[in-house]
Amino acid sequence: MGNDSAMQTRNNVKGNEKIYDVVVIGSGAGGGTVVHSLTKQGVKVLLLEAGGPLNPAKDFKEHMMPWQVPHRGAGEDGRYYFGGMRYGYFEAPNGYWDIPGEPYTVAPGNRFSWFRSRIVGGRTNHFGRISLRFSDYDFKPYSTDGLGDDWPITYEDVAPWYDKAEAFIGVHGTREGLRTAPDGVFQPPPAPRVHEVLIQKSAAKLGIPVIAARKAMITKAHNGRAACHYCGHCGRGCLTASAYTSSQVQIFPALKTGNLELRTHAMVRSIEMGKSGLAESVVYIDKLTRQERRVKARVIVLAASSCESSRILLNSKSPSFPNGLANSSGVVGKYLTDTVGLSVRGQIPALEGLMHYDTDGIRGMHTYIPWWLFGKKLDFPRGYHVEMGGGFAQPQVGTFTGTANRFQSYGKALKKQIRQDYGTYIGFTGRGEMIPNAKSYCEIDPTATDEYGIPVLRFHFAWSDYEIKQSLHMRQTFTDIIRNLGGRPETITATGITTGGEVIHELGTARMGKDPRTSAVNGYNQAHDVKNLFIADGAPFVSNPDKNPTLTIIALGMRMSEYLAEEMRKGNV
Amino acid sequence: MSEFSRRSLVQLTALPLAAQEHNHGEVPASPKPARTNFFTSPEFETLQVLCDLILPADEVSPAASATGAAEYIELLSSNNSRLAKTFRGGLAWLNSQAYMLAGDSFAKLPAARQTELLDRIADHRRAAHSDAPGVEFFDWARRLTVDAYYTSPSGYRDVDYKGGKGMTTYQVPAAALEQALTKAKLK
């Protein structure tokens, strides 16, 4: 399907002076949402995607068993064994940490990993689908504890759009009445697994709440999408679109309206200004012919991912914007954050020798721990939520490496030990809020370009004491929960905190605000400096709360699209 | 939107284990990867003997050779110079020790002498420093043999993996929950 549409649209590129209503750059959660909302209202949209088309029936490896490929998932050249396959052979073709020909640099002494996706649907083909609303206080971080800045919008502004976003993409969960985890429009959640019930009952004794997970996976048929069939392969891409993706749920339906044109392999270099202070055209490289192309539009929407959108702005210099487009404030690239992450797992003797059952369900957790210490006096600001894993997972390459290492045995003894060890591990992963700091930002590297001649980003990144202390609190919590169940936490090194960028929640590099001197876009994601330019990805986020960003990207994308369509009707843009 | 209907769900996403269960009552015998003939015949034979010592047949499941473990290691070694060096060198080391110990190649030693040799290198916590090359080799051999074994239908049956079938509504057997809560003293 993606192939056909890419072919169709490439034909009418040459030499046209067609002016589109809207050009959207990027097809992930932000771009997909804008495209879907606008085309539904009759707006003619051109969608540019830097990667190739997606054909789920061909590209998703859902339901494959490891023995269906001779290398069992390790790769023909065994690259799994040398760290060359961080998400595994069977995962959705969602993106890469290292893209051939598309480098980025990291300032000396800094560490940052930049995940990019180059395919229709972007990271949504693969992501965990955790869908958490921000709390009221998440929009007012400065007012709450004096750190960072407040958003120009409030929970009340966004709540109706959370309702619409959840109702559209389909999110399961339970209503709990917690301020730290506002309730939404939920489908019923799947039943908790045995280890999740054990964790719930045990953690309750420590005063830690465990509630149903909230994920964009449908448990009831919804808008023509079949209910989840609980194969546990969600990360491989879901052929029935029971897990939300922008490709299957927003872009493919939008193509059917006749109002959307999709161009794949379109790597955007810059945005050019026209007369009267408006953005006029998008310049991109067609990766297949390596030729430069230009398209004109009334409105341009950046949704290329936080840092990629910032890169395009910073590379779009003009006499009126010598520091990059829409960057009179100088904030583009600044305030870069990622989520604080730390994991601990442990073996639980009480889980040995139990009855086996099908724990596939929805991949990952059916239950999670929302932040439970809001307002308590701690040695770090803000909070984190906790994700969990366990169960009789489908064996894959690497599943029993830990067991073999632990026992150092062979023969019949090893077979018995693996049998006994299987399904007895539980693991916890913290996802916490980072406070924006002056040492964490991206900028154009003056000395390097990619293979398309586009200057690349250079990253600077540093955790502060706030994040380090938060990660230590995570480690203590997870160790406590595991010990409380009689388990053995596995030794972890140093603080165990993730590398910046590793959680793939990079946000904030073109933040929103009321004041054009300290922010790039207004509360409707519209550039202060250029009124026909919008940013619909994570770049406008003022803070990076302990709630995964995708649901908020979708809600803000819907809200922005409604505002934009109205402004277009009024003739304001 | 019809592409996401239940009917197409069945067509598009037939779950292998469920399908097999329906047809045969159990998952199929292990399909082995084809040999790439990267290893010489004596090398491959030694590797097979080693894999079967690491995971032998028992009352529950067959030996590693039945799951294509040696073929798996050969396939990856033929495309990866680091693995090739590890396994080629390791198999040669094993034979050299076998000759020193009992005057014959590893594959031809009596079972007791083979395990006597493996006992020296299987546990890095107790191994002699002079056996370090063997310890590192054995660790790789064990790791890849385990991976090949438990990514095969025989391995799935061995650990009694119950999934891979899909469900209409996700359900946890009440007996499983009851047993776990009792054992963990959380009732």
Image (cartoon, rainbow, N blue to C red):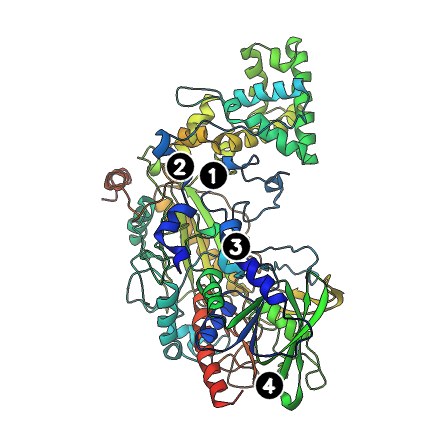
User: Which residue corresponds to the image point at 61% horizontal and 26% vertical from the top-left?
Assistant: B35
Which numbered disc flags the more N-terminal residue, 3 or 4? 3
Q: Are marks 1 and 3 on the same chain?
A: yes
Give amino acid for label 1. Met
Count neighbours of disc 1 (C-alpha within 10 A) and say few if under 14, some if 14 to 19, many if 20 or more: many
Mark 4 touches mark 1? (CB < 8 Å)? no
Mark 2 touches mark 1? (CB < 8 Å)? yes
The image shows residue B99, relative to residue A549, as above or below, that is above
Give amino acid for label 4. Asp
Q: Can you identify the residue that label 1 sits on?
A: A65
User: In terms of secondary structure, where does tag 1 sit?
Assistant: loop
| Chain letter belonging to callout 3 | A
Q: Can you identify the residue that label 3 sits on?
A: A55
Count neighbours of disc 4 (C-alpha within 10 A) and say few if under 14, some if 14 to 19, many if 20 or more: some
For discs 4 and 1, the disc positioned in front in the rendered view: 1
Is residue A232 among the parts visible in the rendering? no
Q: Can you identify the residue that label 2 sits on?
A: B17
Give amino acid for label 2. Leu
Q: Are marks 3 and 4 on the same chain?
A: yes
